[in-house]
Image (cartoon, helix red, strand yellow):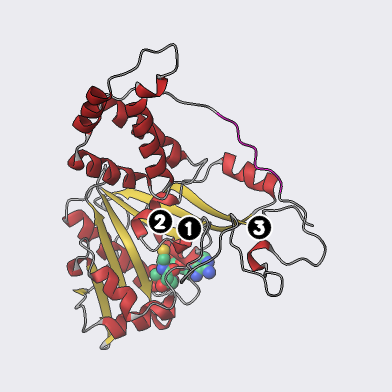
Amino acid sequence: MRVLLSLAAVLMLGAASVSAQSGPTVPPLNPVPDITSLISRLSLDRYKATIKGLTQFGDRRQGTERNRKAVDWIEAQLKSYGCPTERVKYAYNTPPPAPRPAGAPAAAAQQPPSGGVPRISGGGRPRGQRAATGVNNDPLKQPDEKLRALNAEPATDGHDRLATELGLLCRRELLQLRRSLPLDDVARPARDLATRALRPGRDDDAWLAVNNAAFHWHPDQAGWTRSDLDTRVAEAWFDPEGFLLHEEGGRLAGFCWTKVHADHDPPLGEIYVIAVHPDFQGRGLGRALAVAGLDHLAGRGLPVAMLYVEADNEPALAVYRSLGFAVHHRHRWYEGPTRPPQ
Ligand SMILES: CC(C)(COP(=O)(O)OP(=O)(O)OC[C@H]1O[C@@H](n2cnc3c(N)ncnc32)[C@H](O)[C@@H]1OP(=O)(O)O)[C@@H](O)C(=O)NCCC(=O)NCCS
């Protein structure tokens, strides 16, 4: 929303810059040419392309690198449309929250005085069915995985310093690992692992059982249901041929689910989800499944493999290290008190 507002505001400012100067020292303007010029700039296709282009920056939050990049991009767009632009710099220091009187409830939980009319922020009266308002500060609540990845900005020392100053703790660290393809520089399993493609609908229950047993501890991957799987299967990128299953004794023992990011530069082949049922772990199956997945991606012509892994997932890291993966960048989630103790 901030994007739309700032874009709309700049567009209006750019367009109205002539008429906005109609003070006593500026000659009066003929409104008709101005309106004609404004209308001549309206192009639905260009507008739609601009709004779509903004999605490449994810959910923009003030102070983030992707927000700065988006502002640069907006400025370049406006210039390409022939609109003059100008930046106004301002420093905003967040005021400390007002101390709450002892025993008073938190603002969100404030109740009206008995018999009074409930009020929402800004003093208005709540009407109808109301959804939660305000900014979402939890990146994990973003259901769109692509946007979630965009929102998770790579962690820097600056983030760590700021977090330390604010008394925040690193709640989760996620590593993005990469390596080149094909996999011709590491020891391969003695025999290629027998795998087959997922049959959506028919393999769902067996797959969910393995996934949920292996990932019972995982923040994103635990407790998946059929609908979680169906949502991914319905995505344009989904390819059952890249969703490899390995069975032992008629039982699903593990899987390697790959995903192709063809629009990335360079194109990336991701090990999207990989797991071995706990009954089969520690026998080299995880490594062999990863090799099968990477071979599949190399066969599709992908030059680079990528995956995300929790920084403390030692068994997975052992597998990936042995396959020549290295850390490309890190994402960190911080958590802690954001207001001084009262
Ligand atoms: C990661 C996973 C797929 C590995 O499967 P696996 O069949 O057990 O893997 P392998 O037997 O091929 O190798 C496991 C490696 O981890 C090592 N390992 C196991 N437990 C470990 C631990 N607690 N600390 C350090 N290393 C450990 C093993 O020694 C082995 O390394 P080695 O071959 O150098 O000895 C499996 O543990 C799993 O399904 N985990 C839950 C899901 C998951 O985390 N998926 C990865 C998400 S990125």
Magenta-drawn stretch, dominant element (helix, strand or loop): loop
Which region of the structure is painted magenta?
A: 90-96
The quarter of the picture showing ligand 1: bottom left
Asked if the magenta segment contains residue 287, the reply would be: no
Give the residue at mark 3. 336
Position of the C terminus by quadrant: bottom right
Q: Residue at x 37, y 75 (%)?
A: 276
Q: CA distance from mark 2 to mark 1?
A: 7 Å
Q: CA distance from mark 3 to mark 2?
A: 21 Å
What kind of residue is marked 3?
Answer: Gly
Q: CA distance from mark 1 to mark 3?
A: 15 Å
Label 3 packing within 10 angstroms: few (<14), some (14-19), many (20+) = few
Of residues 18 and 9, the one nearer the viewer is 18
Of residues 140 and 137, the one nearer the viewer is 137
Query: Is the residue under label 3 in contact with that under label 1 (CB below 8 Å)?
Result: no
Above or below, comparing residue 138 to residue 256 in the picture: above
What SS does tag 1 mark? helix
Query: Is the residue under label 2 in contact with that under label 3 (CB below 8 Å)?
Result: no
Of residues 95 and 279, the one nearer the viewer is 95
Q: Earlier in the sequence, mark 3 or mark 2?
A: 2
Mark 3 and ligand 1: say if the CB distance to the nearest ligand atom is below 8 Å.
no
Query: Is the residue under label 1 in contact with that under label 2 (CB below 8 Å)?
Result: yes
- Residue 139 marker: 1
The answer to whether 267 appears left or right of 329 in the picture is: left
Residue 267 % position (x, y) = 24, 47
- Residue 191 visible to the viewer: no
Label 2 packing within 10 angstroms: few (<14), some (14-19), many (20+) = some
Which quadrant holds residue 208?
bottom left
What kind of residue is marked 2?
Answer: Arg
Which quadrant holds residue 94?
top right
- Residue 148 marker: 2
